[in-house]
Amino acid sequence: MGGVWAAYDVGRTAAAAPQLASGTWLPERRGAGDFTLTDQSGAPFTQASLAGEPSILTFGFTHCPDVCPATLAMLARVSRATGVPPVRIIFVTVDPERDTPPVLGSYVKAFDPRFIALTGAPATLRAFAKRLGVAYQRDALPGGDYTIDHTAVAFLIDSEGRVAAIFTAPFDAARFERDLRRAAPFLAVHG
């Protein structure tokens, strides 16, 4: 994986940041802080797990009727697009009560078996989301069910595990693909 990103790095320009059409490049990258979540296989996932390769991280829940599945479908398309540098797609639940690791595993596999899904204790998830500026709340529905309103955002994480750019809905796959190509030289680990 490093060779692909190294090839993109060769073409790096002197510009301070890529010009993104559908996202905001952060002037200063920031980490997500210390956290321990659990992936769909039950393994721990921490800040250190974010390092090594670029990722796109988004929040949502498996019972979401529209935005979440549309976002994951778009990210699946983008991750398979020709010429787009490889990125991990990471889906973090805002509904740990219903979204257990097996439920999350089945859900993301329907979009792409390579996707990573994360859950955790409610307080841990809330603190993680808050550090990234993601808000969410549970809203009651008639009949005793509930939904979750949440910030619809995707974070572009660099190879060092730091947030480099933020994309907000509505997402457009073609613009997202172009932005990933533009951002690629700025995401590799430099040493």
Image (cartoon, grey):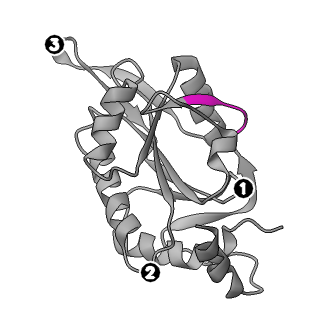
Q: Secondary structure at mark 3?
A: helix
- Asked whether residue 6 appears in the rendered view, the answer is yes
Q: Is residue 128 left or right of residue 76?
A: right
Identify the main secondary structure in magenta. Answer: loop
Q: CA distance from mark 1 to mark 2?
A: 22 Å
x and y percent of residue 54 in the render? 59, 60
Q: Comparing marks 3 and 1, which lies closer to the viewer? A: 1
**Figure quadrant of residue 27:** bottom right
Image depth: mark 3 or mark 2 in front: 2
Are discs 1 and 2 less than 8 Å apart at CB?
Answer: no
Q: Amino acid at mark 2?
A: Gly
Q: Earlier in the sequence, mark 3 or mark 2?
A: 2
Which residue is tagged 1? 160
Residue 143 is labelled as: 3
Report the residue at 51% width, 62% height from top.
Answer: 87
Q: Earlier in the sequence, mark 3 or mark 1?
A: 3
Picture coordinates of residue 129 (x, y %)?
Answer: 57, 34
**Disc 1 marks which amino acid?**
Glu
Q: Which residues are magenta?
A: 33-37
From the viewer's side, name the closer residue of 163 and 114: 114
**Cα distance between the residues tagged 3 and 2:** 47 Å
Distance in Å between CA atoms under marks 3 and 1 = 46 Å
Q: Residue at x 23, y 17 (%)?
A: 145
Q: Horizontal and vertical percent for residue 31?
A: 72, 46
Q: Which residue is mark 2?
A: 83
Q: Residue furthest top?
A: 144
Residue contact at pointers 3 and 1, CB within 8 angstroms:
no
Q: Position of residue 126 (x, y in %)?
A: 56, 26
